Image (cartoon, rainbow, N blue to C red):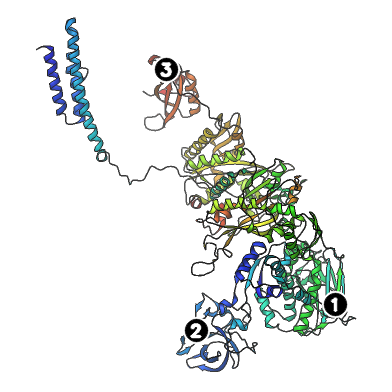
């Protein structure tokens, strides 16, 4: 969570005169990080306080006035369209040379002399948003200039930044969730003290945490009852009577605005101010609106409702922690107060609440009702029970100071248990070892001490008692080491590589295989895709994939509702999306599928899908994918072969073209299936072209890795012969190949180089042509030997009835 | 005419023809004419067989001399022609070198794959081994053993995907929102010391220009004896400089994670403003925070994490880091993707760019 921290406010509690940049740098290196540095005064160069001395109508424009403004050493003539001008009024004058944004919009511009409808104007009387002060002074209407008349004693001509006390620096600080104690001016002052050696102003803190004297007997009675002590370990309240609700003084409004909080009225502002200063959220109730002057901290009953300060009405499910009076919930504990008992302009007595609520309970309630506040964001992080008293005292002090109230009751303090500070064992030698620098023990103790810890003993093991504001954050010795390490400064440590022997561990063969597939396919012109592991509810069914899929209990959208059990739906989705722009292409994906397992985690199984799409009248897409799969098998598998035509182990049979599919086998196991996707399946994905895919199971490859073996090159030349013949349309290459190879032992190499149908080829036939090499390992063949082998091949083809082959001469 | 004279005549004629040949082709014809199977010289030499024994030897020698002489002259001329042809090859075999090359298939690896490879390679040279652990896991691995108590905000369902399966002995099943579950799996193997880099898909319930519900992280884990913060600094400094450039500076900034203590945010100096926080001309750099950009989290492994896996934290210690792959490569100069969701939509116009 980021907080906006005024440097001046911090300096009230930690004495430092470091330049803001240096302060920010040092804080960031050892504590909460300063992300940005804002200087509100930078926007206010050449902007001064002016007093309107004279107002005349503009001779040429009804809606404009010509004013004479006293800016100290001179009087300026300024044309102004403001609707709330009056003589004697203090205004913000942006002089020539200042930077303004017209009507608070667009880019900042540098103001020059101007002539407006024939009258010269030397500057402008600014609205708050024109000089970047809208946060401080929200304009109530359009064309309303900033009325600074509350600056009664400020002489005309004073630079505005000085007059408003804005010559301050505001740090935008990221405070980690474990440090709610640092989300305040005093908390950051403590950090500054420990990190930069700034002296912490303990005396001032003590003074401001002291409860003014209280009446010995309640003038206005109040009963506090806590029914849920686990969820509310401490609840403190006090009644202040005789308050006048009205606007806050400027110094208070300025501090709230710098922190990004809107000013409401003095009582509400006090509660926010105390939160920003001490980190303890507060609430203020209208005392007389509380029924039977009773506060009950309890669980909400089902269907109870509350209308909160922001005007929204919430219905409780039951069990949420609420602050109630005798009749109804009056606040969502730690989140937001109710309207019925909120601070009103006419009320005269206020109940200030400072309490501690269970972090998880506040977070869950705020989430469930979807209502968040500066208070809930702090409570969610876990606050100590020991921060409430000082906050209550500070609020009462301020109420007396700026709202004229005085305490009318004793402090009601209900707590679950007496406070016991936490103590942990700490070994400075162990700390130095983990940090990797010889930080002396004495130095470590002084750092911990600066952070508010108390040490008992000075030996190898000491007892460290931690301050209450670190209750929820420091949980053991290791946390104390971190405190020492960060104050010492990570930037002071050397950068070293670990010594020791690197563990020898073979690379996971599956990961290596996946990488090889990527290399082969990308090298062959394929493009890698990565799709979401989550797919739509009906994606599997559309792709014809049966069986259960693992569902998400809380999907983000219906498109991402189940874990995929197959890569086909993702792939078809890719084709559907790209087919129009890219009519033919080739992609692959390697990713896990998630197969339901009875009573266990889904089985995460790696899969490869290789696909191409485009026209495929003669199975072009099929062959394109087959080429790629062949390359993969040759490169990565031992003992691979093609299954029988029509086999379909790894794709749903109904989604695979029955005439264009075949398994890839490694050993006896199916390692994948290659097929064109059935047009009916494609249609369900809106795909109008043809798609061929191969789905591969990497595990089968990994268990049969290709093992390069040395085969001596042939010693004797072979005899090359070509053989062209007509064959029956359904005579397959695989069968012909087997027949040729089996025809004679001298057949050494066979390669199909041409398939042709059409002119000169009988209608039910195809023309096929093979290169054949005849070779013997131990001699050069004679012409007669080669002829004999060739004749055997011819006979094998022509005598086979299925092939019905006839040799072309 | 004696055979001698006849041979001399052939020699004279042959050499004259050789010298007169105007091209390599003509020269070949000359060679065939005299030295071919039915060439003039060849025929004369065949006549030698008819000579009486005693003359045959001398005549044979003479014939051979003629043959050598013609050969020599032929070779010289052939070499001349070859060298002339060589010199003129640029003219005779001119092609249009500005014509496009024969297309080579152009494949593409996904940007994320490229980043994973580069990251893996950098850690591999420091002795890390790449592993991959489950994406759907029990919350014991994803949270509990990582020192995240049951009420930790990260375990609430609005940030983590829960899988609709009955809880097992090790809790509910979640889609891991980080790769840190790999730390627990790795520690459970009980093979110490450890230098692991776990790269896997992760899932979080968010989707906008800077978040995708599925993304990748790389998780480093070093467990050994005598490991200190200085080693974490050394390893991550090396990675940052090797990956982003030697001129970049890094810093460790205190941060908070449940499973490391101390914890850090690792920052790297901003590439745009050179780490100054200010652009030329004095404007504030909007891409960084006071000159620094966050790289990711890291920290010293929390003793509770070691205890949860039965490793003695008094004996062993180490550090861990888990960074987003996508975030890391997006921060590398040159890749500006304004909407992260484009990464996994698989638009070929996108995929073909990398």
Q: Residues within 10 Å of mark 1 (few under 14, many from 20)?
A: some
Q: Which residue position holds label 3?
A: A791
Mark sitting on residue A291: 1
Foreground residue, A244 or B253? B253
| Residue A592 in view, yes or no | yes
- Left-right relation of A5 to A294: left
- The earlier-in-sequence mark between 1 and 2 is 2
**Is residue A711 depicted above or below A171 in this figure?**
above
Q: Considering the numbered disc 1 on the image, is that residue within a helix, a strand or a loop? A: helix
Q: Which residue position holds label 2?
A: A96
Across and down, in percent, residue A237 comes to: 83, 74
Q: Residue furthest right?
A: A217
- The earlier-in-sequence mark between 3 and 1 is 1
Residue at mark 3 to residue at mark 2: CA–CA distance: 107 Å
Q: Quadrant of residue A605?
A: top right
- Left-right relation of A656 to A432: left
Across and down, in percent, residue B95 comes to: 29, 42
Across and down, in percent, residue B125 comes to: 57, 44
- Tags 3 and 1 on a common chain: yes
- The earlier-in-sequence mark between 3 and 2 is 2
């Amino acid at each position: 969570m980021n907080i906006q921290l005024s440097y001046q406010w911090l300096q009230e509690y930690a004495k430092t005169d470091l330049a803001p940049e240096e302060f920010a740098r040092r804080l960031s290196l050892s504590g909460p990080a300063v992300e940005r540095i804002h200087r509100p005064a930078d926007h206010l160069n050449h902007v001064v306080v002016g007093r309107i001395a004279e107002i005349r109508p503009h001779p040429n424009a009804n809606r404009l006035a010509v004013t004479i403004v006293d800016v100290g050493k001179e009087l300026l003539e300024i044309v102004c369209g403001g609707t709330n001008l009056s003589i004697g009024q203090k205004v913000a004058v942006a002089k020539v040379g200042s930077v303004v944004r017209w009507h608070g919009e667009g880019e900042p511009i540098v103001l020059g002399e101007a002539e407006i409808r024939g009258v010269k104007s030397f500057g402008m009387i600014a609205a708050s948003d024109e000089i970047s002060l809208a946060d401080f002074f929200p304009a109530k209407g359009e064309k309303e200039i900033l009325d600074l008349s509350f600056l009664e004693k400020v002489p005309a001509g004073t630079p505005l930044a000085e007059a408003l006390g804005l010559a301050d620096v505001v740090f935008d600080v990221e405070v980690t969730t474990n440090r709610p104690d640092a989300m305040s001016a005093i908390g950051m002052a403590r950090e500054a003290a420990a990190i930069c050696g700034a002296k912490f102003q303990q005396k001032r803190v003590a003074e401001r945490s002291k409860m003014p004297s209280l009446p010995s007997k309640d003038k206005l009675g109040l009963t506090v009852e806590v029914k849920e002590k686990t969820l509310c370990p401490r609840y403190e309240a006090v009644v202040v009577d005789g308050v006048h609700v009205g606007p806050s003084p400027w110094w208070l409004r300025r501090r709230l605005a710098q922190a990004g909080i809107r000013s409401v009225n003095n009582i509400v502002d006090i509660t926010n101010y105390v939160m920003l200063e001490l980190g303890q959220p507060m609430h203020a109730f209208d005392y007389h609106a509380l029924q039977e002057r009773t506060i009950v901290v309890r669980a909400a009953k089902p269907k109870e409702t509350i209308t909160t300060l922001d005007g929204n009405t919430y219905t409780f499910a039951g069990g949420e922690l609420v602050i109630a009076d005798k009749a109804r919930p009056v606040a969502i504990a730690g989140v937001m107060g109710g309207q019925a008992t909120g601070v009103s302009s006419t009320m005269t007595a206020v109940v200030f609440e400072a309490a501690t609520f269970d972090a998880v309970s506040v977070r869950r309630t705020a989430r469930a009702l979807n209502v968040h506040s500066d208070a809930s964001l702090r409570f969610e992080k876990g606050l100590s029970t020991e921060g409430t008293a000082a906050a209550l005292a500070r609020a009462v002090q301020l109420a007396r100071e700026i709202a004229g109230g005085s305490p009318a009751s004793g402090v009601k303090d209900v707590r679950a248990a007496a406070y016991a500070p936490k103590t942990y064992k700490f070994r400075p030698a162990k700390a130095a070892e983990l940090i990797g620098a010889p930080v002396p023990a004495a130095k470590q103790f002084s750092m911990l001490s600066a952070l508010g810890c108390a040490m008992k003993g000075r030996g190898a093991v000491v007892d460290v008692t931690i301050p209450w504001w670190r209750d929820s954050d420091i949980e053991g010795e290791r946390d104390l080491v971190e405190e020492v390490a960060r104050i010492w400064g990570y930037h002071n440590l050397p950068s070293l590589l670990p010594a020791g022997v690197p563990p020898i561990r073979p690379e996971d063969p599956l990961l290596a295989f996946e990488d090889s597939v990527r290399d082969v396919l990308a090298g062959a012109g394929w493009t890698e895709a990565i799709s979401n592991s989550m797919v739509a509810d009906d994606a599997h069914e559309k792709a014809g994939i049966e069986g259960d899929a693992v569902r998400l209990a809380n999907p983000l959208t219906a498109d991402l509702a189940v874990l995929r059990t197959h890569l086909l739906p993702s792939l078809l989705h890719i084709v559907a999306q790209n087919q129009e722009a890219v009519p033919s292409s080739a992609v692959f994906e390697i990713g896990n599928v998630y197969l339901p397992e009875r009573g266990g985690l889904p089985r995460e199984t790696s899969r490869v899908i290789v696909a191409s799409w485009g026209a495929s009248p003669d199975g072009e897409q099929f062959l394109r994918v087959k080429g790629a799969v062949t390359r993969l098998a040759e490169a990565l598998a031992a003992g691979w072969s093609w299954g029988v035509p029509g086999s379909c182990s790894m794709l749903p049979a109904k989604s695979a073209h029955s005439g264009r599919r075949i398994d890839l086998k490694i050993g006896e196991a199916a390692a994948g299936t290659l097929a064109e996707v059935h047009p009916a399946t494609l249609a369900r994905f809106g795909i109008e072209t043809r798609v061929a895919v191969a789905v591969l199971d990497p595990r089968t490859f990994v268990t049969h890795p290709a093992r390069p073996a040395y085969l001596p090159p042939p010693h004797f030349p072979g005899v090359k012969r070509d053989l062209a013949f007509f064959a029956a349309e359904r005579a397959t290459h695989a069968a012909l190949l087997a027949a040729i190879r089996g025809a004679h032992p001298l057949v050494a190499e066979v390669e199909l180089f041409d398939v042709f149908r059409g002119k000169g080829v009988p209608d039910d036939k195809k023309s096929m042509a093979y290169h054949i090499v005849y070779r013997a390992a131990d001699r050069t063949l004679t012409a007669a030997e080669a002829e004999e082998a060739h004749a055997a091949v011819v006979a094998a083809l022509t005598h086979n009835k299925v092939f019905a082959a006839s040799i072309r001469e | 005419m004696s055979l001698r004279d006849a041979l001399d005549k052939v020699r004279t004629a042959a050499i004259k023809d050789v010298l007169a040949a105007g091209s390599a082709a003509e020269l070949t014809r000359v060679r065939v004419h005299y030295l071919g199977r039915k060439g003039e010289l060849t025929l004369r030499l065949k006549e030698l067989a008819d000579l009486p024994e005693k003359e045959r030897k001398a005549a044979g020698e003479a014939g051979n001399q003629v043959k050598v002489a013609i050969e020599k002259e032929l070779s010289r001329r052939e070499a001349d022609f070859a060298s002339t042809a060589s010199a003129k090859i640029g003219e005779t075999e001119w092609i249009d070198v500005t014509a496009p090359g024969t297309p080579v298939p152009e494949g593409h690896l996904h940007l994320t794959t490229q980043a994973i490879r580069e990251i893996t390679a950098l850690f591999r040279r420091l002795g890390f081994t790449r592993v991959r652990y489950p994406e759907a896991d029990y919350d014991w691995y994803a949270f509990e053993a990582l020192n995240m108590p049951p009420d930790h905000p990260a375990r609430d369902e609005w940030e983590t995907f829960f899988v609709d399966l009955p809880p097992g002995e090790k809790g509910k099943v979640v889609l891991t929102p980080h790769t840190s579950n790999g730390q627990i799996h790795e520690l459970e193997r009980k093979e110490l010391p450890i230098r692991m880099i776990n790269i896997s898909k992760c899932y979080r319930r968010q989707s906008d220009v800077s978040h995708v519900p599925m993304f990748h992280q790389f998780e480093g884990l070093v467990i050994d004896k005598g490991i200190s913060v200085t080693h974490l600094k050394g390893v991550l400094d090396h990675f940052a400089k090797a990956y982003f450039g030697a001129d970049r500076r890094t810093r460790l900034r205190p941060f908070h994670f449940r499973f490391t203590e101390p914890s850090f945010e690792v920052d790297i100096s901003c590439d745009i403003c050179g780490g100054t926080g200010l652009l030329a001309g004095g404007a504030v750099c909007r891409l960084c925070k006071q000159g620094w950009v966050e790289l990711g989290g890291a920290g010293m492994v929390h003793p509770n994490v070691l205890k949860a896996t039965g490793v003695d934290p008094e004996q062993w210690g180490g550090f861990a880091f888990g960074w987003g792959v996508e975030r890391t490569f997006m921060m590398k100069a040159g890749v500006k993707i304004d909407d992260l969701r484009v990464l996994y939509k698989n638009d070929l116009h996108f995929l073909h760019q990398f």
